[in-house]
Image: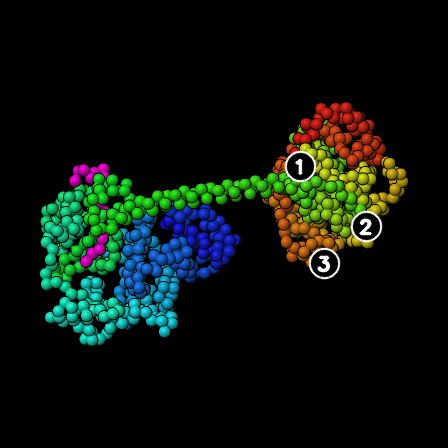
């Protein structure tokens, strides 16, 4: 089928059911999105689309096909065929009778079109039998949709069509589908009854040839209009024309001469491609130009089927089959084995014309013309325009169709270019999204948008926020005993889990340097629940760290986490690789909470404790400790959150995590994973200031009603996406070089006076920091590798 059909089917699905339905249908059928109008596609594509549409919409095939037939008629009208269809015939019978002629005309442009064929019979009661022939099975239900739409739009009538017979047509070559419809027609509006509709209702069933050669008057009473053969010429004219008005009477009957006033030679030259043959297919007469091309026709009494085969309609070459399709255009093609030697390298000649049965002679007249679509086909057959009779419109048709083919080729090129531009635009849109995601991974979205628009981003002061720092315990020893790739894999596995937790709790990841991870709540978008969000995020970090393997010990890694709340100043610094950084004493205090913390503990400052103490968090008092640069400070450890389950904190469901109930407590058991945790859908936690959806009750441990979301693309950039636990590498010196070089004194003081897990200064770590300060410029390039 041509792409016009598939384009129509796509348009119907999009208009009736929406673009999303078409995308699903296209994906299930496994076909492309766009079809070129003049491109030929396999029939299986259309059949697959229809089949999947029935399955997707849950309706029977006949319903989809009938609706497609109705839409196809409207689609043809919108595509420029409206005027042609309206002028095809004056009633439904003639319209259907001339469909084959319409398809023959369209075949000039659509060379490979394999259209169905139609034959109509009138019944005495005014109904019609519509015979439908097609090479394709299962599409007959399109016909009622098309014919019904035509009857309603063009002839203001309603019809019913039912299948009265469905069989294999033995008279046609091969296995063809032959469906017979009984068509009943009545006016939709009784007052509107045209002359042609009256003719359809009142005319009885007659042989086709008789109706063609001797039309009946439209009035039932024939005796009211009778023309005498003895009338004079002027009396006849007066009987035909109303004086002063010049309108023919409705009861016209032709007058035939007593004998044919044309000699044989003139007739054979005037109609150079006609053939007269009898019921046995014996040729009695042929046009002169046809004799010149097929010399065998000069020998009279030859059988026509020896020299020609019927191309359309595909019927057996017998007089009875031909008379069944008497109203169709017949296309005959010469047989190569009967053509002269000069035609060996040429395409065969095809004739297209009308079969007219002559009862007085018991012969069939085939009045035809060469079937030529362009000047190129004329040259390929070594023919000239002069070979065609001057009165034959084939001359004009070839010249006009030559121009039309050129326009079609131009239109086809434009369609192809349009499709290329569409694909290019789609590709550019995908690249734009990737670029934006990468930019949003580096900067907050609103800040990135301002930078894209060329606007200056001013620093902002946030009076209240919560900052979190974390690092890996004994990271120095791990780096000294492993290969660099093992360190990279371990950190990537850990940060990938942390990054996805930022989506669950909607906190902002500021940056990562070496094994250090920094997160802030309430910045860049202020929220009142910033402390709760960061606290739940910290609990999730402890749980997620249990899934990351220490390449040295083979067990889970241990992390220290510190939290502090207070005011900060935030802004974008730098021109190359700009970063969104936080400044202020709150950053230093949060860093002190992490450096003075204990393994697998979440260390809280007094400000964070005050923000969480009236919530559902379980907090243990640590007591007073000496904090470098801050003096004596009472700090706390965050144990857990009894208001939510660990599954909610991790943003996954019980089925994904393998959670189970033990002694009234929820036990978090990592599921046996058949896929990486990255592929799990995340369920965001709900807070009092969460937008849109209502909060769930705190006692609900399973967030079934909350929509699952996938992590943002920006959170996956730079991830290796691997479960490989063979982690090697020594990045210890690299780690401390990162921290010393940071603006805002966020990490420098921590490591210049760094404390181990026991609160004592690590001499080896101090030595490495001092060495890193001297060689900072040498390691700058390596530093960016770790960040990436």
From this view, report whether residue 114 is shown above or below residue 746.
below
C-alpha separation, residue under disc 3 versus residue under disc 1 = 35 Å
From this view, report whether residue 420 is shown above or below residue 705.
above
Earlier residue among tags 3 and 1: 1
Q: Residue at x 38, y 72 (%)?
A: 189
Question: How far from the left and from the top, in percent, is residue 273?
Answer: 18, 49
Specify the label residue 342 is tagged with: none
- Judge from the rendering whether residue 628 lies leftward or rightward of residue 340; answer left or right: right
Which sits in the foreground, 644 or 15?
A: 15
Q: Is residue 345 magenta?
A: yes
User: Helix or strand or loop: what does disc 1 sit on?
Assistant: helix
Question: Residue 721, located in which quarter of the rendered image?
Answer: top right
Specify the label residue 492 is tagged with: 1
Earlier residue among tags 2 and 3: 2
Q: Is residue 540 visible?
A: no
From this view, report whether residue 585 is shown above or below residue 271.
above
Residue annotated with mark 2? 611
> Alpha-carbon neighbours of circle 3 within 10 Å: few (<14), some, or many (≥20)?
few
Q: Is residue 325 visible?
A: yes
Q: Residue at x 25, y 67 (%)?
A: 246
Question: How far from the left and from the top, in percent, is residue 626?
Answer: 88, 38
Which sits in the foreground, 724 or 389?
A: 389
User: Helix or strand or loop: what does disc 3 sit on?
Assistant: loop
C-alpha separation, residue under disc 1 versus residue under disc 2 = 32 Å
Q: Which residues are magenta?
A: 340-356
User: Helix or strand or loop: what does disc 2 sit on?
Assistant: helix
Residue annotated with mark 3? 697
């Amino acid at each position: 089928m041509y792409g016009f059909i598939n384009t129509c089917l796509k348009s119907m699905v999009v208009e009736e059911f929406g673009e999303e339905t078409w995308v699903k249908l296209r994906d299930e059928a496994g076909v492309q999105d766009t079809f070129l109008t003049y491109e030929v596609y396999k029939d299986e594509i259309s059949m697959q689309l229809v089949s999947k549409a029935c399955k997707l919409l849950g309706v029977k095939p006949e319903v989809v096909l009938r609706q497609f037939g109705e839409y196809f008629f409207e689609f043809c009208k919108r595509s420029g065929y409206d005027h042609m269809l309206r002028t095809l015939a004056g009633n439904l019978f003639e319209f259907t009778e001339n469909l084959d002629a319409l398809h023959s005309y369209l075949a000039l442009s659509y060379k490979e079109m394999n259209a169905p064929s139609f034959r109509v019979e009138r019944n005495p009661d005014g109904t019609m039998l519509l015979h439908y022939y097609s090479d394709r099975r299962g599409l007959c239900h399109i016909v009622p949709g098309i014919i019904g739409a035509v009857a309603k739009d063009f002839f203001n009538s309603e019809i019913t069509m039912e299948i009265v017979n469905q069989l294999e047509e033995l008279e046609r070559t091969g296995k063809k589908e032959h469906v017979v419809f009984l068509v009943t027609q009545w006016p939709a509006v009784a007052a509107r009854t045209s002359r042609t509709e009256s003719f359809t209702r009142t005319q009885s069933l007659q042989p086709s040839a008789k109706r063609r050669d001797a039309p009946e008057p439209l009035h039932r009473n024939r005796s009211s209009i009778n023309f005498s053969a003895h009338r004079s010429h002027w009396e006849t004219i007066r009987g035909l024309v109303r004086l002063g008005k010049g309108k023919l009477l409705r009861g016209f009957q032709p007058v035939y001469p007593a004998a044919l006033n044309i000699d044989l030679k003139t007739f054979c030259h005037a109609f150079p491609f006609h053939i007269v043959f009898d019921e046995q297919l014996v040729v009695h007469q042929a046009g002169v130009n046809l004799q010149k091309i097929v010399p065998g026709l000069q020998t009279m009494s030859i059988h026509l089927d020896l020299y020609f085969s019927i191309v359309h309609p595909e019927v057996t070459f017998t007089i009875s089959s031909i008379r069944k399709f008497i109203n169709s255009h017949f296309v005959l093609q010469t047989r190569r084995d009967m053509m002269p030697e000069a035609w060996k390298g040429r395409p065969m000649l095809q004739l297209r014309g009308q079969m007219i049965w002559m009862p007085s002679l018991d012969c069939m007249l085939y009045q035809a013309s060469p079937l030529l679509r362009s000047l190129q086909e004329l040259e390929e057959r070594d023919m000239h325009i002069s070979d065609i009779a001057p009165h034959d419109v084939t001359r004009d048709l070839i010249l006009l169709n030559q121009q039309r083919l050129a326009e079609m080729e131009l239109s086809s090129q434009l369609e192809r270019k349009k499709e290329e531009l569409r694909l290019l635009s789609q590709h550019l849109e995908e690249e734009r999204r990737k670029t934006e995601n990468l930019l949003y991974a580096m900067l907050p979205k609103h800040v990135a948008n301002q930078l894209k628009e060329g606007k200056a981003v001013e620093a902002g002061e946030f009076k209240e926020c919560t900052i979190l720092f974390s690092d890996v315990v004994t990271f120095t020893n791990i780096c000294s005993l492993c290969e660099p790739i093992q360190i990279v894999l371990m950190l990537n596995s850990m940060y990938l889990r942390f990054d996805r937790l930022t989506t669950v709790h909607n906190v902002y990841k500021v940056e990562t340097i070496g094994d250090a991870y920094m997160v802030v709540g309430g910045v860049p978008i202020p929220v009142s629940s910033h402390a709760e969000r960061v606290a739940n995020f910290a609990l999730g970090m402890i749980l997620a760290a249990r899934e990351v393997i220490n390449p040295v010990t083979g067990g889970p890694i241990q992390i220290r986490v510190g939290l502090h709340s207070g005011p900060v100043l935030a802004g974008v610094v730098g021109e190359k690789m700009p970063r969104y950084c936080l400044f202020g004493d709150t950053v230093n205090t949060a860093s002190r909470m992490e450096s003075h913390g204990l393994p697998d503990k979440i260390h809280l400052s007094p400000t964070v404790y005050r923000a969480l103490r009236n919530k559902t968090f379980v907090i243990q008092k640590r007591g007073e400790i000496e904090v470098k640069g801050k003096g004596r400070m009472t700090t706390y450890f965050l144990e857990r959150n009894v208001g939510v389950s660990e599954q909610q904190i991790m943003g996954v469901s019980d089925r994904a995590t393998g959670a189970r109930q033990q002694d009234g407590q929820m036990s978090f058991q990592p599921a046996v994973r058949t896929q990486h945790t990255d592929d799990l859908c995340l369920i965001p936690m709900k807070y009092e200031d969460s937008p849109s959806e209502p909060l769930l009750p705190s006692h609900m441990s399973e967030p079934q009603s909350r929509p699952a979301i996938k992590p943002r693309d920006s959170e996956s950039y730079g991830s290796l996406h691997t479960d490989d636990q063979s982690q090697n590498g020594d990045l210890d010196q690299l780690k401390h070089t990162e921290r010393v070089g940071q603006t805002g004194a966020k990490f420098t003081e921590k490591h210049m006076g760094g404390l181990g897990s026991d609160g004592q200064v690590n001499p080896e770590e101090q030595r490495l920091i001092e060495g890193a300060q001297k060689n900072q410029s040498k390691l700058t390039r390596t530093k960016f590798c770790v960040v990436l």
